[in-house]
Image (cartoon, rainbow, N blue to C red):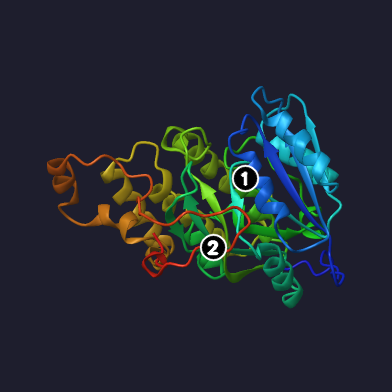
Amino acid sequence: MLNQNVLQALPQKPLLSIVVPSFNQGAYIGSTLDSIFLQSYRPIEVIVVDGGSNDDTIQILREYSAKYDSLSWVSETDDGVADAVNKGLKLAKGHVAAIQSSDDIYYAGAFEAAIESLKKNPHCGIVYGDSDTVNSDNKIIAHYKVPDFSWEGVFGISLSLPQQCTFFRTDVSRAIDGWKSQYYSCDLDFWMRMLLQAPAVKASIVFSAWRSHEDQRTVPAHFEHIWRGYWRMIEESDELKRAPRRLRRLASASRHIMAFRCHPTGNLYALRWHALLAFVLFPGFFRYLSPRQLRPLIPGYTLVRKLRGKKREFVRIIDGPTATPGMPRPVFEEFQSSL
């Protein structure tokens, strides 16, 4: 699967391009930009592609572009996040790039760690790390520990590499098309096609924090779009059809594993059926799920759930410290385990 002709040697100080798609995120985009410009690594370029926001986003972008020469931005009506990302990737001149949402934040040292990992692993096209989840007040409420890279690992999490803590080489991304708007989770399709060009490596660092709020794309109200799009993505991938049989089998299992993340109905009987099919295709899939995700498979869980009147959980709320954009991750022992 490795396409050695795609990978070129990185320079000593590669240019890092950060593409930021944006639409009406004036409440958060300042924190996102702070977390970028407070990084010590240089050279960088920051490309904000705004979809014609009608809040205070434009004023914020004007203020930051007057302060930072490495920031460029455009604001115009677009066809959604995939269109915005593709515009940004076409403008990017860097050897390495990242796509950061306009409401997420990086921790200090993220850029140096990403570049160093890719230089130490010249055969890899992607580097990723772990991620926290923060609320609107930057208070950490959850942690996502991503498995080390393997095909079992990436399909065990249904390709859910956190966008906010993933960096990639642009020579690999340019070897494939950009984001495909027909899939709601365009980033998952993008990661899969890049991974079929060159493998990834995990850095032992928490790169960033993903912000959880009701206006974002990845919320239960959008689970049906995510679910159906993922199934279509796996079934329609020309690159996957040419992949070895083992990868095709893992990819097929990942469709059923996705039920643990965003099944549109949350029906426990349907979830157990998907678990059975996933087990037939990939017996070790459960290693990549959290206890919270596996709990519905326990006999009697349905009755206990009804008696307690529990609603479906989205994230487990934890009373963590406050994350400051661009500053080191807060240290706290009780929060080191994965959800």
Element type where label 1 sits in the image: helix
Three-letter code, disc 2: Arg
Q: In the image shown, does 116 or 227 lie closer to the viewer?
A: 116
Q: Is residue 149 above or below residue 29?
A: below
Q: Quadrant of residue 108?
A: bottom right
Q: Residue at x 85, y 44 (%)?
A: 91
Q: From the viewer's perspective, tell me whether residue 37 is left or right of residue 102.
A: right
Q: In the image shown, does 263 or 73 lie closer to the viewer?
A: 73
Dot 2 alpha-carbon crowd within 10 angstroms: few under 14, some 14 to 19, many 20 or more = many
Element type where label 2 sits in the image: loop
Q: Are marks 1 and 2 in contact (CB under 8 Å)?
A: no
Q: Residue at x 50, y 40 (%)?
A: 218
Q: Which residue is mark 2?
A: 329
Horizontal and vertical percent for residue 124? 71, 69
Rounded to the nearest angstrom, the CA distance separating label 1 from label 2 is 15 Å
Dot 1 alpha-carbon crowd within 10 angstroms: few under 14, some 14 to 19, many 20 or more = some
Q: Which residue is mark 1?
A: 31
Image quarter hosting the N terminus: bottom right
Earlier-in-chain disc, 1 versus 2: 1
Q: Residue at x 52, y 60 (%)?
A: 155
Three-letter code, disc 1: Ser
Horizontal and vertical percent for residue 46? 78, 48
Residue 253 visible = yes
Residue 101 visible = no
Q: Quadrant of residue 60?
A: top right
Horizontal and vertical percent for residue 199? 67, 67
Image quarter hosting the C terminus: bottom left
Horizontal and vertical percent for residue 183? 60, 38
